[in-house]
Image: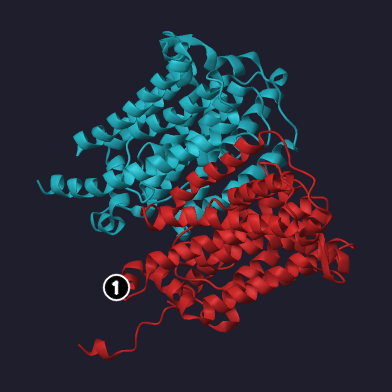
Amino acid sequence: MRTLMKHREVWLLAAIAALVALISLRFPGFARPGNLAAVFNDTAILMILALGQMAVILTRSIDLSMASNLALTGMIVAMANAAYPGIPVPLLIVLAMAIGLALGALNGLLVWKLGIPAIVVTLGSLTIYRGATFVVSGGAWVNADQMSPAFISLQRGAFFGLPVLSWIAIAVIALFYLLMTRTPLGRSIYAIGVNPTASVYAGIDVGRTKFVVFCISGLLAGLSGYLWISRYVIASVEVANGYELNIIAACVIGGVSIAGGIGSVGGAVLGALFLGIISTALPVINISPFWQMAISGGAIILAVVLNARSERKEGRIILRSAAA
Amino acid sequence: MTDTTHAPRHIPDRLDKPLGSALFSWEALLVLVAVVIFAVNSFASPYFLDAWSLSDLTFNFTEKALIALAMALLIISGEIDLSVAAIVALASTMMGMAVQAGVGTPGLVLIGIATGLACGAVNGLLVTRVGLPSIVVTIGTMSLFRGVAFIILGDQAYKGYPPDFAFFGQGYVWWVISFELVLFLAAAVIYWFVLHRTSFGRRIFVIGNNPVAAQFSGVRVARIKFILFCLTGLMAGIASVLITSRLGSTRPSIAQGYELEVITMVVLGGVSILGGAGSILGVVLAAFIMGLVTFGLGLLNVPGIVMSIFIGLLLIIVIALPIVWGRFSRRRMA
């Protein structure tokens, strides 16, 4: 099973390499390690969000509220920083994660305790959290000059040649890899996606696990809230508007099955990277940025068509290895 | 087995509610909500109870509600279409191009509707022929369709629609009754008839309840789903004609975010997001409720983004209420 999973990621990696090679034909500097590191850094936030979304999708749920959660936590943290510049930035990051966690837990509770489908709950909270961002801020923006220097510079500091933002993404990826492959929770998440009924008989609390998964996606959305605001140094109601579908697109391109149970940390990360490369590369090779949307749309459909084939095969392989 | 002599399993138009009686049906709940909101609005603003105000109110939802009618059928069949707003944008862009080429009003309407139909067919083919999950396909085509609109238009806008084209989105049939409202009500009656009074509608419920069983019972699942995707595209095309006519211009960002509002309308109307249950009456009521809420709050100078909080809360509360209520009454009985 594991070799096959790697197999698909290898394909995705090959597609990314081909993409980079293609871009390098038009713009030779693109494949330089320094530039690739910059692309990774640009994509870091999307990767973090895609991992949270992946965990949710694996349990046959979906979290449409991540971008709104990000906007709300980002706004609150930015306003806290503007009003009380004395609060140390690490504390603000913890605050962002706590608020994100609370917002995610709210989704999770409705899914767990009332059994409302996740898509309905998060469709509602998508608009509520976005509206709350407006209420909290009164529609005003928090600009760069209102933020403290430490707030802006923390994620930009270089550390072993990479910005702190990249290191945060790497840490999240590593932790997520351990969570998904080395813990009972990760096992339960996959099990619920593959067969919820069998999971109940296996002693897994399906509702509670879904709740935990929404807490995780909320926590990561909150963390991304701080990262997004301090990276683009503007907090407004419009931050990351419509981004929830980019996050899902990253997962889908990365081979995460919307039907649940199939997907890997590496896949989600590569899916995000693929979208990130497209968006950073188009301007440098003189393709109008207006093409970006259509290209990523085409990429999503292509990825789904390709994944649909491999998914069917994999279903059998999983059973075989379980029998062995 | 004695079971074999039983009548075929009753296929519900909606999932069993704890309060099963007609008086406490979902539609009754929606009517109650609508009346309460209507009353609150009348008290809150002196400008609300006026024929022209109420007429303006309908423009808030008729375009989205037209799409919601077809979306309801699609969701009942167990699929979903997130690309409807992008279809509106692409159809509007095509009409804009046609205007530049000197096409007259009948041609524009035809192009708008045909574009919608074609986009719906693309979604339908990808879902039924290639066998992909519709939520993912339509996230992809959502980017693709709007992306094509962006490629064609960039940061430009199309204007210069012929004067008689304005009738569809701005015209009145009689007194304060707008063309949009008449079109929506007519479409609602047609959709009600198709869903609740024809074998085609029955099959949609069957597919939504159990697609595999439907297939084995001789229902052409793929064909019906394909037709439903085409219908949804068609309605998005019609909505695009109305919106473009009302605004008198086309930008690639037109109708941004409509897809979630349309789906909210459908779910609020009592259609199960899991498929297999729902009614057109519920969707129509939900459309009016959303129109009432946004218009009433608009009269009170509440910004649009704050209205969305109310819509979101309404959605969750209306869905949660019967569940909480059911649990409460069950506990009391025990």
With A321 as the anchor, is B166 left or right in this view?
A: right
With A186 as the anchor, is A319 left or right in this view?
A: left
Protein image colouring: by chain
The image position of residue A141, as x and y in percent, is: 73, 30
- Above or below for A74 versus B205: above
Q: Amino acid at mark 1?
A: Phe
The residue nearer to you, when weighing A139 against A136, is A139
Q: Give the residue at x 28% y 35%.
A: A8
The image position of residue B153, as x and y in percent, is: 66, 37
- Above or below for A230 versus B313: above
Q: Indicate the chain on which mark 1 is placed.
A: B
The image position of residue B308, as x and y in percent, is: 68, 51
The residue nearer to you, when weighing A177 against A101, is A177
Residue A22 seen in the current view: yes
Chain B hue?
red
Q: Give the residue at x 37% y 56%.
A: B129
Q: Give the residue at x 28% y 51%.
A: A194
From the image, which quarter does the C terminus of chain B lie in? bottom left
- Above or below for B333 versus A221: below
Total number of numbered labels?
1
* Residue found farthest to the front: B102
Residue named by callout 1:
B216
Residue A54 seen in the current view: no
Image quarter for residue A251?
top left
Chain displayed in cyan: A
